[in-house]
Every structure is written in structure tokens, then in C-alpha cells.
Amino acid sequence: MSAIPVADDVLDADVEVLSLTEVANQLGLSANKVRQLLRESQLVAVRRDGQLYVPSSFLAEDGLVKGLAGTLTVLSDAGFDSSEMLRWLFTADDTLPGTPIEALRTNRGTEVKRRAQASAF
């Protein structure tokens, strides 16, 4: 079994994070399934105080935020590591406006993925 990739904690202290158990409960999944999502790069986790956490903004009421997994794939294909992905998703972009993760949460995924693809150049 491959190790779970963990990003550096590049998030601002005010970014709400959830433990893997909390993520599993919110999604109605087992903790092992959440670890699988992390290994498959459908989610990104950070380590704080020795524990893994996922930004709560990656979750919607009915599952993962639509377009998140695809955006992570595009960023990975562009050469971003997990820490760079988090930094990109949570950095404000005046032309969106807001952050890419906020745009994904408001169903503007096409624009976010377009920008992710463009960031590879």
C-alpha cells in the first residue's frame, strides 16, 4: 500500500480543517476510504500536531466539492506538488474574484480548471 501524500501546512491558521475521522463522518465513508481518496489525490491533507487534516472547504453537503478532484489532477499534471496545490487553491485571485477553492464551491469549476491548465505554462 502506498503512503498517503501529505502537504506542508501552507494554510493560513484561520483555514478550518477537519480530521480524517471528521471527514469520514461528514462524507459517510470509512476512514480507510478517506485515506484512499488521499492516496488517489482526490483530496489533499496537511499534518498539524502530528495528525492529518483536510481543509473543510473541500467538502460539500453531498460529498467532495464538485471539480476539486479534476482540478487537483490538472495541477498535478502541471507539476505542482501537494503543498503548491494548496497554496494555489487558497491564494486570492482578484480576477476570479476570491480564491480558486471558493470559485469551485460556487460552481465556477470550468474557469478554475482553465486557470490551473494555464498555470503550467
Image (tube, rainbow, N blue to C red):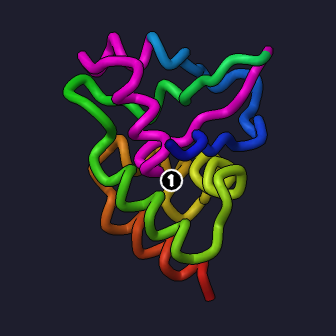
Quarter-wise, where is residue 79 in the image? bottom right
Q: Nearer the viewer, residue 65 or 79?
A: 79
Q: Nearer the viewer, residue 110 or 76?
A: 76
> Which residue is drawn at the image coordinates 36% and 60% (left, top)?
70
Q: Nearer the viewer, residue 108 or 46?
A: 46
Q: Mark 1 = which residue?
A: 100
Pinpoint residue 96: horizontal percent, then vertical percent. 49, 60
Pinpoint residue 40: horizontal percent, then vertical percent. 42, 50
Mark 1 closeness class: few <14, some 14–19, many ≥20 residues within 10 Å:
many
Q: How many marks?
A: 1
Viewport quadrant of the C terminus? bottom right
| Residue 92 visible in this rendered orientation of the protein | no
| Amino acid, disc 1 | Pro
In-image side of 89 versus 72 (left or right) = right
**In the image, farthest residue toward the left:** 62
Pinpoint residue 117: horizontal percent, then vertical percent. 48, 78
Secondary element at tag 1:
helix
Highlighted range, magenta: 22-49
In-image side of 36 versus 50 (left or right) = left
| Residue 95 visible in this rendered orientation of the protein | yes
Q: Relative to residue 30, is residue 65 depicted above or below?
A: below
> Which residue is drawn at the image coordinates 75% and 21% (left, top)?
48
> Which residue is drawn at the image coordinates 63% and 23% (left, top)?
52
Q: Is residue 42 magenta?
A: yes
Pinpoint residue 35: horizontal percent, then vertical percent. 46, 31
Q: Is residue 3 magenta?
A: no
Q: Relative to residue 20, is residue 62 depicted above or below?
A: below
> Which residue is drawn at the image coordinates 46% and 70% (left, top)?
74
Quarter-wise, where is residue 32 in the image? top left
**In the image, farthest residue toward the bottom:** 121
In-image side of 7 versus 59 (left or right) = right
In-image side of 85 versus 105 (left or right) = right
